[in-house]
Each structure stands twice: as structure tokens, then as C-alpha cells.
């Protein structure tokens, strides 16, 4: 009678096993609940952003400068262009520095100095953006005696460099050593090898890193508050206060006017769309470019 | 992987007479080029180092007047009065700590739940999209979080959550006072949403390096899936998860815009989470460009210096913890 022989064992084991099985199911349920709780705000933010933003975006918003309080209409065209201007300044300063430092770490950085620079980059990555704003204020604004697009660009460049440095290093280290040796074997000097072979091979990875850094700083507001400062009018001079999209969103969001709230939502939607398309466009272009070369 | 040395390259070149000729004609130019290139790249590397030195130098230099005027009392003082030039940073330090801790209390279970679910429980096909969505949270700019918090989160808090909390938990003293919505609680919640992706992505990374045989061993001993996760996976990854949590804390401490928009910006120390507060980063955002005198500016920069030092310590600690798990020896090889 095998059934009878089994049943006492089952009877003693079953209660514990049941409790353990219930715990197992409960914990799975808890994990699913956590996932749902995290995804709900995500979808809520995007849904609300699209809902409020789409209703407020119009041609005037994209082509006009802000109107004074009380007047309807107006837009954020100067802020959109100003953001692009500040980001261009930041990229001009930050990208070469970051890529250069990444090349140093990957090609010459297997020593104490390399370790120190690596650690410094990681530390810089964690410095609060508002503190970087203070430093840009101290070294540019106090020197120039007024707020400027350049100060904003410097602040954002400082934020871009660590990310670009670390990803460039990682991407260069992924390039097979045989490729470098083949280049040396052809008598190509080391610097040419690094630029034309190693960096060229890693281009798509390096650019992805640059875009990550770009996307990260594109929405930054805190370091621009007392560097670029904002401006109600057009400005494309590097030494003058300049409007930026995130700044404008912030100022409008905390204002008491409904008309400005609408504009803030429209600005937020435009900001996110610009960030996403910039990243997607470059990724697409890079992918096509390297397929051709490889 | 050690980088190839130029010496090796020369050896290779030296093997054929044609190449030797080529090497001779190229040699001098190539070597000078190499020197210049290496020097230029070194300068870029040193610029990274220089930036950090510059940050420290500027912060220390420009906060000097405040340090001389108040000394350590600066961090214990409760008055913030630009008109009479009395500056104490305690309410801001309090606000930063409380809002960040609140964010951690909310975010940690969520983030670990998401990480465990994506690595251990969910079907493979769901894994990619799920991580993508959670990481998408990290891509939303801080000011957009703030905007959403002002117009969606705060009304929900003041209409539903706060009345409910004060009815049920009001006796603790943490949930009393008028339900305005704008509060320390709102700041903590929006911070929590912002740091979940950081903590969960680090946790996921750490969980994935736990050796597969740990899981198999636990299952072979008859453990249920949850017991396997608890004993075989989470216990092994403790140090790394802690690192992820501290990294999230670092982000929360320095977060500026979203907090500034919902915390109420009043330098008060109140027990109730419904009361408005002020953080170190928010006071910089609000008052820096309108500082009235040198001492006021120096006091604000000293707050920046304090924030900088705290985040550096927190981040260094976090990186160390994550590093012990992902690259070094397993944190508990005897477990």
C-alpha cells in the first residue's frame, strides 16, 4: 500500500510546504505590485504631459517670444533656440575634452594617474548640478560681471565631461588588440592608429556616450539658474544672458497664471521631444555610417 | 588588458626590409607625433582632474567670509536672515536629510521589487521592455517632474492622501496640520520616483553577477523560488544593493528643481511631514541670483560646499560597495 505509506509523511510536511508555497506566491505578488507602482507614475507623467502639452502647442508657441503677463499668446521660440545655443557651446567645450580624456585613459591610462583620473570622473559625475552652477558662476559670471550663455555652456560642459570620458574609455577598450597591432604592423604611428583605427572603430559607441551626456544635460535647469539666467528676448551672443527651455518651464510653472502654466506644459513636451529625437537621430545616423565603413 | 607598447610595433616593423625603410622614413615624424598626441590627451585627462580641484578651490575660497563669520555655528544655527546678516544652515540640512530619507524609505522596496522581478521572476520577453520603461524614468528632466508634481501629485496629496493619513496616522505626529499638498511629503514622494531607476538598475546589475550555481544549489535543496531569491541571491548581493541605495541617496541629496517646486521653501524645522520645508539645494536655486551682500553669497556658497562634500562621501562609499560585488571577490564567499 504505497498510498498509505506516503500519507503520514505528506501530513507532516504538507503544512510547512503550504506555508512556504503561500509565502512564495505572496512575494511574487508583492514584486509585481512594486513593478506596477513604479510604472504608474511613469505612464501618468507621460500621459499628462502629452494631454496638457498637445493642447497648448501651436505655431505661435514655436515662433514667438514670451508676451507680458495678461496678454494671450506668445511662445518660447527664443528659449528653444537659446537652449540649442547653450548646448552647442557646452558640446564644443565638453566633447573634445571628454573624448580626449577617454583616449588618455584607454591608451595610456594603465597607471596611478589613470586611476586617479578615472576616480575623479566618477566623483564629478555625482556632484549635484546646482553646485556646478555655483562654480560656473564663480569662474565665468563673476569674471564677466554679468550672466551669460557662455557661463551656462561651461556649467553644462563640466557635467558632460565625466560621462563622455568613461564611455569613450570603455568603448575604446572593446576594440580588439589585433586591430591596433595590424595598424602598427603597417608602420602607422601610434597616434594615427588611435585616431583612424581605434577611435574610428569605436565611433558608434563613443557617439552614444556623447548623446547620453547630451540628453542628461539638455533638461538641466539648476546649473542655468544663475549662469545663463534667462531672457525674455532673442539672444545669440555668448556673453549675454540667454533664455533656455528648462528655465522658462520652471519660471512659468511656479507662476500663478493659467496662461503660463499652459506654456510650461507645452515647453515640457517640446523639451522631451527634442531630447528624444536628438538622441534617436544621431543613433540612426551613426548606425548607418558605421555599417558602411565596416 | 594592457595597452600595446610602441616597442612591440617597432619589432614587428623591423621584420621586412620594405617595412624597415617605411619605418625609417616615418619614424621620426611618427615619434614626434606620438609625443604630441600623448601630451594632448594627457592634458584632457588632467583637465578632468583640474575641474574637480577647481570646484573645491572655488567653493572653499568663496565661502571663506561666511566661515570666518560663523565657524561651525553655521551648521547649528536656525536663523536665516539676510537683512540682519545672520545665517544658520540647520533648517536646510534638516530638510535635505528628511526629504532624502523619506525618498529612500519609499523608493528602496519599490526599486528592489522591480529589480528582483526583472531578473528572477518575469518571462524573458518582458525583461527588456520593463527595464527600458524603468530607465525611461531616469531620462525625464527634473523640471518636468516638478511640473507634474505641482499640477498632479500635490492636488492628489491634499485632496485624498493627506486627509486619509491624518485620520489614520495623525496620532504619530508625523501627519498633522493643514493638508496643503505642498510639503516635505510631496518632496519625498517626487524624489522617490526619481531615484527608483538608479537603485533598481544598480540592483539589477548586482543580482545578475550572482553566480547561477547559487540559485541552482538553493533550488536543488528544495527551496521555493522566493526562498532561493532570499537566501541564494539577495544575501549574496547585499553589499552591492546597499551601494545602489547609497547612490540613490547621493542623487536625492543633490536634487534641486523638482524639490524646490513642491517643498514649500520655508526654513522651518517641523515634525509633521505635512509642513513645508527647505533643502540645501533649493535655497541655492531660489536665493543665489538674488543674494544681497557678500556675506549672504558666501553663506550660500558654504551651503553648496557642504552639499558637495556630503555627496562626494556618499558617492565614494556607494562606488566602493558596488565595486566589491561586481568586480572584486564575492562579498560573502562563505555564505
Image (cartoon, coloured by chain):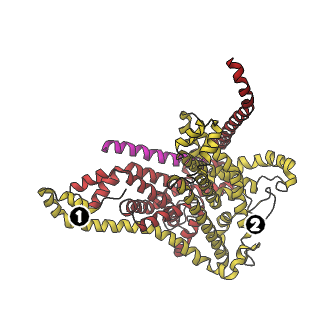
**Closer to the camera: disc 1 or disc 2?**
1
Task: In the picture, one chain is yellow; tell me its letter.
Answer: B
The answer to if A276 sits in the magenta stretch is yes
Quadrant containing the N terminus of chain B in the rendered view: bottom left
The chain carrying label 2 is B
Q: Relative to B260, say whether A50 is above or below.
A: above
Q: Which residue is mark 1?
A: B30
Q: Which residue is mark 2?
A: B267
> Residue B16's x, y, as percent?
14, 56
Task: In the picture, one chain is red; tell me its letter.
Answer: A
Q: Which image quadrant for residue A57?
A: top right
Q: Which residues are magenta?
A: A267-294
Q: Are marks 1 and 2 on the same chain?
A: yes
- Please indicate, yes or no, whether residue A20 appears anywhere in the rendered image: yes
Give the farthest residue toward the bottom: B68
Give the CA separation, mark 1 to mark 2: 63 Å
> Residue A95's x, y, as percent?
43, 59
User: How busy is the neighbourhood of tag 1: few (under 14 within 10 Å), some, or many (20 plus)?
Assistant: some
Which sits in the foreground, A218 or A33?
A33
The answer to if A66 sits in the magenta stretch is no
User: How busy is the neighbourhood of tag 2: few (under 14 within 10 Å), some, or many (20 plus)?
Assistant: many
- Please indicate, yes or no, whether residue A47 appears anywhere in the rendered image: no
- Relative side of B38 to A67, left or right: left
> Residue A136's x, y, as percent?
54, 68
x 35%, y 58%: residue: B2
x 76%, y 64%: residue: B266
Which sits in the foreground, B223 or A264?
B223
Amino acid at each position: 500500500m504505497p498510498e498509505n505509506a506516503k500519507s503520514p509523511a505528506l501530513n507532516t510536511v504538507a503544512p510547512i510546504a503550504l506555508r512556504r508555497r503561500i509565502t512564495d506566491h505572496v512575494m511574487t505578488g508583492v514584486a509585481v505590485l512594486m513593478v506596477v507602482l513604479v510604472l504608474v507614475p511613469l505612464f501618468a507623467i507621460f500621459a499628462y504631459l502629452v494631454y496638457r502639452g498637445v493642447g497648448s502647442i501651436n505655431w505661435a508657441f514655436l515662433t514667438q517670444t514670451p508676451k507680458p503677463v495678461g496678454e494671450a499668446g506668445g511662445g518660447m521660440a527664443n528659449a528653444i533656440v537659446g537652449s540649442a545655443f547653450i548646448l552647442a557651446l557646452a558640446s564644443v567645450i565638453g566633447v573634445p575634452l571628454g573624448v580626449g580624456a577617454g583616449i588618455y585613459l584607454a591608451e595610456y591610462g594603465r597607471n596611478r594617474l589613470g586611476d586617479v583620473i578615472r576616480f575623479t570622473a566618477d566623483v564629478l559625475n555625482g556632484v549635484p548640478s546646482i553646485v556646478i552652477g555655483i562654480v560656473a558662476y564663480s569662474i565665468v559670471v563673476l569674471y564677466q560681471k554679468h550672466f551669460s550663455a557662455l557661463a551656462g555652456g561651461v556649467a553644462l560642459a563640466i557635467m558632460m565631461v565625466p560621462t563622455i570620458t568613461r564611455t569613450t574609455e570603455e568603448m575604446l577598450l572593446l576594440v580588439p588588440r589585433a586591430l591596433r597591432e595590424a595598424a602598427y604592423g603597417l608602420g602607422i604611428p601610434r597616434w594615427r592608429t588611435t585616431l583612424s583605427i581605434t577611435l574610428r572603430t569605436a565611433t558608434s559607441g563613443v557617439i552614444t556616450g556623447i548623446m547620453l551626456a547630451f540628453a542628461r544635460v539638455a533638461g538641466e535647469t539648476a546649473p542655468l539658474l544663475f549662469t545663463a539666467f534667462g531672457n525674455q528676448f532673442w539672444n545669440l551672443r555668448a556673453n549675454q544672458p540667454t533664455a533656455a527651455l528648462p528655465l522658462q518651464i520652471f519660471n512659468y510653472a511656479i507662476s500663478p497664471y493659467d496662461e503660463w502654466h499652459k506654456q510650461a506644459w507645452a515647453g515640457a513636451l517640446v523639451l522631451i521631444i527634442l531630447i528624444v529625437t536628438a538622441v534617436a537621430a544621431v543613433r540612426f545616423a551613426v548606425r548607418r555610417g558605421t555599417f558602411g565603413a565596416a | 588588458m594592457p595597452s600595446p607598447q610602441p616597442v612591440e610595433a617597432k619589432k614587428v616593423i623591423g621584420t621586412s626590409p620594405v617595412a624597415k625603410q617605411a619605418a625609417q622614413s616615418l619614424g621620426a615624424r611618427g615619434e614626434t607625433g606620438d609625443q604630441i598626441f600623448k601630451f594632448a590627451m594627457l592634458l584632457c585627462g588632467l583637465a578632468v582632474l583640474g575641474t574637480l580641484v577647481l570646484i573645491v578651490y572655488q567653493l572653499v575660497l568663496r565661502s571663506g567670509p561666511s566661515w570666518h563669520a560663523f565657524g561651525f555655528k553655521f551648521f547649528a544655527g536656525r536663523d536665516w536672515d539676510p537683512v540682519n546678516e545672520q545665517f544658520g544652515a540647520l533648517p536646510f540640512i534638516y530638510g535635505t536629510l528628511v526629504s532624502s530619507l523619506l525618498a529612500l524609505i519609499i523608493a528602496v522596496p519599490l526599486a528592489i521589487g522591480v529589480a528582483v522581478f526583472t531578473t528572477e521572476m518575469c518571462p524573458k520577453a518582458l525583461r527588456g521592455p520593463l527595464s527600458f520603461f524603468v530607465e525611461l524614468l531616469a531620462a525625464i528632466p527634473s523640471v518636468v517632474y516638478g511640473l507634474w508634481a505641482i499640477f498632479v501629485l500635490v492636488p492628489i496629496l491634499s485632496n485624498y492622501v493627506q486627509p486619509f493619513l491624518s485620520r489614520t496616522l495623525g496620532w504619530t505626529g508625523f501627519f498633522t496640520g493643514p493638508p496643503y499638498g505642498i510639503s516635505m511629503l510631496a518632496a519625498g514622494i517626487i524624489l522617490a520616483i526619481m531615484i527608483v531607476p538608479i537603485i533598481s538598475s544598480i540592483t539589477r546589475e548586482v543580482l545578475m553577477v550572482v553566480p547561477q550555481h547559487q540559485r541552482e544549489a538553493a533550488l536543488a535543496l528544495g527551496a521555493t523560488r522566493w526562498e532561493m531569491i532570499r537566501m541564494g541571491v539577495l544575501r549574496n548581493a547585499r553589499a552591492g544593493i546597499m551601494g545602489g541605495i547609497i547612490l540613490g541617496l547621493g542623487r536625492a541629496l543633490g536634487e534641486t528643481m523638482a524639490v524646490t517646486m513642491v517643498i514649500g521653501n520655508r526654513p522651518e524645522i517641523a515634525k509633521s511631514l505635512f509642513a513645508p520645508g527647505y533643502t540645501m539645494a533649493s535655497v541655492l536655486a531660489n536665493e543665489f541670483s538674488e543674494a544681497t551682500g557678500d556675506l549672504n553669497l558666501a553663506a550660500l556658497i558654504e551651503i553648496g560646499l557642504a552639499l558637495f562634500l556630503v555627496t562626494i562621501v556618499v558617492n565614494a562609499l556607494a562606488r566602493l560597495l558596488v565595486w566589491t560585488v561586481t568586480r572584486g571577490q564575492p562579498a560573502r564567499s562563505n555564505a
